[in-house]
Image (cartoon, helix red, strand yellow):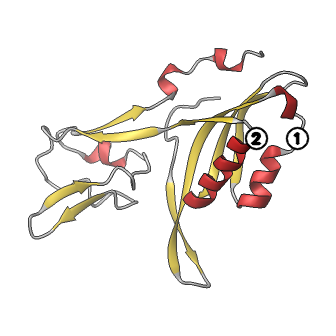
Amino acid sequence: MSLTGNCHKQQHIINSKEKEVLAVYTRIYILRFPKDIVDQPIICQLVKQFDVEFNILKATILPQHEGVMILELRGHRENIKKGLSYLKGLDVKAESVATSIHRDDQRCFQCGACTGICPTGALALKRPEMAVLFDAEKCSGCGLCVTVCPVKAMEVSQDRISGFSESVFEVH
């Protein structure tokens, strides 16, 4: 199973009651469970209490041993934060595995090609200056800007996954 590529995404959904656009985030985490709680339905509680979806990408969970899981969480940013706080309260260590985009401001000549393709609004054209603004907080790491940039000023980096190895699943 490959863990490369887009590690987090952002989509927009319409809340029919309020008619407002809400951001839905997807993030990948490495979770380490203390051995005394590996038999509890912790991930089930994330779904029930915090309205997040999950996808278990890989896991090693054995009775009376530390559990390790790579988990993709999807939901609204605040719900994911609350879910991570819940995990922290159970002494589950959560480490984010994220893809991020960086802009080389020396290379960028403000052509704006990236602004038209950015699905999250992380890249926007400031008028009347016609300056390309980059908001890393809004960036989902999709990489579309990298492919359209004529001077390759946008770069993808793996914040945690580059050092990933199977040793993370050794049982302690």
Dot 2 or dot 1: first in sequence order is 1
Q: Amino acid at mark 2?
A: Leu
Badge 1 density bin: few <14, some 14–19, many ≥20, Cα 10 Å:
few
Q: SS of the residue at dot 1?
A: loop
Q: Is residue 119 left or right of residue 25?
A: left
Q: Percent position (x, y) of residue 88? A: 68, 42
Residue 48: which quarter of the image?
A: bottom right
Quadrant in the picture for the N terminus: top right
Q: Percent position (x, y) of residue 44? A: 82, 50
Q: Is residue 38 left or right of residue 168?
A: right
Q: Is residue 171 above or below residue 99?
A: above
Q: Look at 77% across and 15% down and name the residue there.
A: 172
Q: Which mark is residue 89?
A: none
Q: Is residue 144 left or right of residue 26?
A: left
Q: Amino acid at mark 1?
A: Gln
Which residue is label 2 attached to? 90
Q: Is residue 154 above or below residue 157?
A: below
Q: Look at 59% across and 77% down and name the residue there.
A: 15
156 and 79: which is toward the camera? 79
| Label total for image | 2
Q: Is residue 86 above or below residue 17?
A: above
How far apart are labels 2 and 1 at the CA level? Answer: 11 Å
Q: Percent position (x, y) of residue 145? A: 31, 48
Which residue is label 1 attached to? 40
**Dots 2 and 1: beta carbons under 8 Å?**
yes
Q: Percent position (x, y) of residue 54? A: 70, 48
Q: SS of the residue at dot 2?
A: loop
Q: Nearer the viewer, mark 2 or mark 1?
A: 2
